[in-house]
Amino acid sequence: MLEITGLRAGYGGTEVLRGIDMQVAAGEVVAVLGANGVGKTTLNKVISGVVPARAGEVRFDGRRIDRAPAASIVAAGLVHVPEGRKIFPQMSVRENLELGSYRRARTRRSSNIERVFTIFPRLRERTRQAAGTLSGGEQQMLAIGRGLMAEPRLLILDEPSLGLSPLLVEEMFILVRRLSAEGLTVMLVEQNVVQSLEIAHRAYIIENGAVALYGTAAELLAGPEVKRAYLGL
Amino acid sequence: MFPTEILLEALLNGLMTGAIYALIALGLTLVYGVLHIINFAHGALLTCAMFLVWGGFALVGLDPYVALLPVVPLMFALGYGVQRWVIGPASHGEDNNILLVTLGLSIILENALLAVFRSDTRTLQTDYAFDVVPVGPLLLSTPRLIGAAATLVVTGLLWLLLNRTDTGRAIRAVAHEKLGAQLVGIDVRHIYAVTFGIGTACLGVVACLLMPIFYVNPRSGGVFVLVAFTIVVLGGMGSVPGALLGGLLIGVVESYSALYFGDSLGQLGIFVIFILVLLFRPSGLFGARA
Ligand SMILES: Nc1ncnc2c1ncn2[C@@H]1O[C@H](COP(=O)(O)OP(=O)(O)O)[C@@H](O)[C@H]1O
Ligand SMILES: [Mg+2]
């Protein structure tokens, strides 16, 4: 569904992505792991068209999207829930969700809002509240809910567990597993290595702007490299 | 002291002028709130709109109020185009550049108008320019009353647009969270241009409301926009309700300072208030945001 080959990108004089190759197949949960600053968020931004690629290709359903405007990438069903949520703080919860279907699935807006409220009952109680006044966990729910409003075919989640309490982190991973069970394809970008590998089918480990290691989640969990580098064993 | 009737008349006149000021400030504050730029071309664009209304009247006898129909969409298209294809590309995303681009644009527009129309002052003669409506013991100018009513209608429409349509929600979304907006599929360049277009469309409305009672020369827009800048600061930069209330307040202040200190000093009170606000409430009288 998503194929990335030789992808390079950066900011000004610094190159952040130094030739990334990876794939996400329909129905998978693919984890993208790596320490802070290795370029995970940059990768997501290039895929979703807000940071330009400098070389390489990104294909979604076989179609090149590495020169496409961000709006058309959303229209194609590739939806990115960004790090730091980036919800619209001064707008109500409902308006945030409504804007989730700005470019896609607009005709099913009200039924999808109901669906999001079923997944996140806490948001229903806060429909009219300004999004900026929600708690961190609620803001993360809203960000994901806003992403779901577009009926994504591939959902990119950038560090959804960042800044959440351990209990909420657990809830977040359960949610990802549930969305996947309902048929959604997910690219999960995380620093929470163990929990991500527990729910992912496959994973890529990024170091220094390139894929250092990849394989099935089970292989990686059992392999020596991950144990040594990320689990401190 | 003046008799109550005169004070009351000054109040109402001030509110009516203030409504027009508010409409000019509304466009300015909307563009500031969303694009985060101070549009120095606002005055020159107002002058363009006023010449457009004047031209329609002088060439084909188009009544200034009927002129709303062509002038408002035309000004929207002009504003959209200028932002999308001139200001946006020329500024490369740097706020300082945008400032200079809008300043340059205003100089070009003003000089183009000077070249075509010279600095002569022009007016239109309508047969209702001096009509009055008796309100109790007072006589209120009909065109000014129409202007105030139209301002209220436009403000209401703008509120509906911003709060009840997807385009309006997109405008508000872009104002505070550009990345989030891009990621839900909002085309930010388009929304910037739409916002700029709405700002200039407001100027189109203002021009139609002003021309029955005011004159136009290549500098007349600038006079109004100076006051509008004061209102935007007074109301809180980027605040739409602030612009409306600030406009009304400034209209009243101007009206009373003209009453007490004479017509030529009418705008003195405005700038005294401006400086006081800058000193004591830099975020504006009504503005919550700093
Ligand atoms: N807008 C930007 N401008 C310049 N450098 C950036 C920008 N965003 C990120 N970087 C740099 O790019 C590198 C990778 O950042 P990022 O993609 O956010 O990594 P990660 O998400 O893996 O933590 C970091 O060194 C960061 O400082
Ligand atoms: Mg990141």
Image: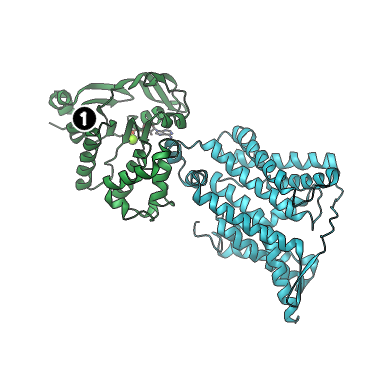
Chain colours: A green, B cyan
Above or below: residue A170 compared with residue A205: below
Q: Residue at x 19, y 28 (%)?
A: A229
Q: Residues within 10 Å of mark 1 (few under 14, many from 20)?
A: many
Residue B103 visible in the displayed image: no
Q: How many marks?
A: 1
- Image side of residue A6 versus residue B263, left or right: left
Q: Quadrant of ligand 2?
A: top left
Above or below: residue B251 compared with residue B41: below
Quadrant of the snapshot with the N terminus of chain B? bottom right
- Image side of residue A132 versus residue B219, left or right: left
- Image side of residue A61 versus residue B232, left or right: left
**SS state under label 1:** loop
Q: Nearer the viewer, residue B66 or A103?
A: B66
Image location of residue A115, percent across then percent down? 31, 43
Q: Nearer the viewer, residue B275 or A147?
A: A147
Q: Residue at x 64, y 34 (%)?
A: B86
Q: What residue is disc 1 on?
A: A200
**Where on the picture, by quarter, is residue A75?**
top left
Q: Nearer the viewer, residue A233 or B131?
A: B131
Q: Nearer the viewer, residue A208 or B123?
A: B123
Q: Residue at x 27, y 34 (%)?
A: A190
Residue A189 visible in the displayed image: yes
Image location of residue A38, percent across then percent down? 32, 29
Image location of residue A206, percent across then percent down? 28, 26
Q: Residue at x 54, y 46 (%)?
A: B34
Amino acid type at circle 1 is Ala
Query: What's the chain of the residue with tag 1?
Result: A
